[in-house]
Image (spheres, rainbow, N blue to C red):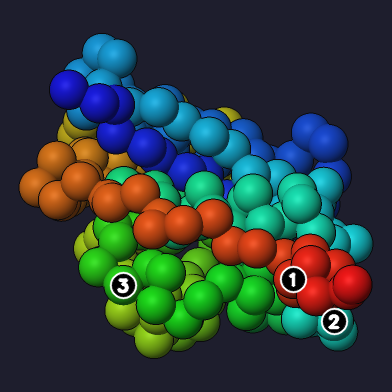
């Protein structure tokens, strides 16, 4: 049986970043709940693709690295999307990445949404900004969204409290369950030929 493909999109801007740290913990918990060796995790750091995303927005064509990331998201059995919260919403880099993805690529795909921020006051940004974005893209968003404020990182949490570790495990369990029930994602029918190569082929 082929491993399930779990793609993690992290929009953290610094290295190291709390956004990436949250993404890694969600991925590890999802893999653990899916069973040993059943999930193949690929992490996409949008920070490394920032220039390519901007160029794609103005030219309409992705570079090689961005095209590879977009294809990975399209072929994933499950997606974890984590963004820092700026001005009570997702970051511009996070939104721009999903703007360059085909509108149908996430249809029916299980998605776990998460975010980081300085204080818990911005936690509702997940519900009024991030969840509607993925609902618009017709993804299946897991019920539990995970928000981690600065203070959350020091909390222990256990099965009887609702601290960060408990929220991570609950959301990861929901994602793992949806990935298990999802039909296998078919391979792309054919590789997309870049427009520049198509033009070159027309030259005599």
Front-most of 148 and 42? 42
Q: Mark 2 points at which residue?
A: 59
Q: Which of marks 1 and 2 is in front?
A: 1
In the current view of this chain or complex, which residue is farthest to the top?
36
Q: Position of residue 104 (x, y in %)?
A: 39, 77
Q: In the rendered structure, are the residues bearing label 2 and label 3 in contact, judged by CB atoms less than 8 Å apart?
A: no
Locate residue 59: give its quadrant.
bottom right
Camera sees residue 131: no
Q: Is residue 179 left or right of residue 153?
A: left
Q: How crowded is mark 1: few (under 14 residues within 10 Å), some or many (20 or more)?
A: few
**Residue under the point 79% across and 67% down:** 201
Task: Give the Cα distance between marks 3 and 1.
Answer: 28 Å
Which mark, by number, is residue 198?
1
Counting residues from the start of the chain, the first of labels 3 and 1 encountered is 3
Q: How crowded is mark 2: few (under 14 residues within 10 Å), some or many (20 or more)?
A: few
State which quarter of the image contains the C terminus: bottom right
Which mark, by number, is residue 107?
3
Kind of element beneath mark 3: loop
Q: Is residue 47 above or below residue 93?
A: above
Q: Where is residue 171 in the image (x, y as percent from the top left)?
A: 29, 47
């Amino acid at each position: 049986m082929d491993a399930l493909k779990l793609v993690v999109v992290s929009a953290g801007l610094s290295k190291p970043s709390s956004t990436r740290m949250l993404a890694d913990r969600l991925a590890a918990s999802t893999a653990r709940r899916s069973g040993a060796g059943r999930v193949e995790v690929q992490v996409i750091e949008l920070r490394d693709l920032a220039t390519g995303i901007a160029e794609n927005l103005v030219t309409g064509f992705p570079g090689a690295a961005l095209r590879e990331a977009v294809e990975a998201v399209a072929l994933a059995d499950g997606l974890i999307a984590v963004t820092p919260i700026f001005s009570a919403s997702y970051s511009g880099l996070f939104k721009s990445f999903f703007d360059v993805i085909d509108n149908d690529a996430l249809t029916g795909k299980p998605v776990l949404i998460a975010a980081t921020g300085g204080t818990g006051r911005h936690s509702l940004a997940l519900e009024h900004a991030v969840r509607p974005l993925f609902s618009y893209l017709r993804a299946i968003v897991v019920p539990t969204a995970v928000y981690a404020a600065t203070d959350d990182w020091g909390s222990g949490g256990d099965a009887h409290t609702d601290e960060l570790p408990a929220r991570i495990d609950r959301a990861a369990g929901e994602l793992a369950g949806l990935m298990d029930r999802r039909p296998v994602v078919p391979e792309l029918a054919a590789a997309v030929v870049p427009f520049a190569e198509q033009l070159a082929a027309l030259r005599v």
